[in-house]
Amino acid sequence: TAYSGRLDRCGGIESERWDNKSMDTATSDIQSVLWDIPEEKVVTLSADFLIMRALSYGTVPLMLHIKRRYGLDAVRNVFRSLKPTSMSARRYAYAKNVLLA
């Protein structure tokens, strides 16, 4: 397959159909937002934590993937719990007005 086991455990996208280019992007994106998490701890991460990291630090494709994976309601709930200063003003406006609209 085109994705790593690490992504399967934390992102859960193994059940979705992705082309190789999208999968490679999702793999590198999820790994980039988990820079400070030891690999053995990745499997213990909650969905809310992954959503928060994707919203705060992820690329647009990763945010879209997280929205598809965990659902609009879950992403909205996490977004509402974040302080507006936890992400750039531009990212906050995108999430509020486009991603979660």
Image (spheres, rainbow, N blue to C red):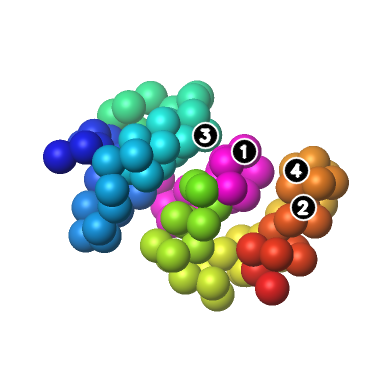
Q: Which residue is mark 3?
A: 33
Residue type marked 3: Val
Q: Which residue is mark 4?
A: 87
**Which range of residues does the magenta coloring cover?**
43-60
Image height check: is 94 above or below 30? below
Q: Are marks 2 and 1 in contact (CB under 8 Å)?
A: no
> Residue sitting at 64 percent across and 63 percent down?
99
Q: Are marks 4 and 2 in contact (CB under 8 Å)?
A: yes
Q: Are marks 4 and 3 in contact (CB under 8 Å)?
A: no
- Report, in whole angstroms, how far the alpha carbon at label 3 lies from the one at label 1: 6 Å
Q: Which residue is mark 2?
A: 92
> Which label sits on residue 57?
1
Residue type marked 4: Met
Residue type marked 1: Tyr
Q: Nearer the viewer, residue 67 or 24?
A: 24
Whether residue 28 is visible, yes or no, is yes
Q: Nearer the viewer, residue 62 or 51?
A: 62
**Mark 4 / mark 1, whichever is N-terminal:** 1
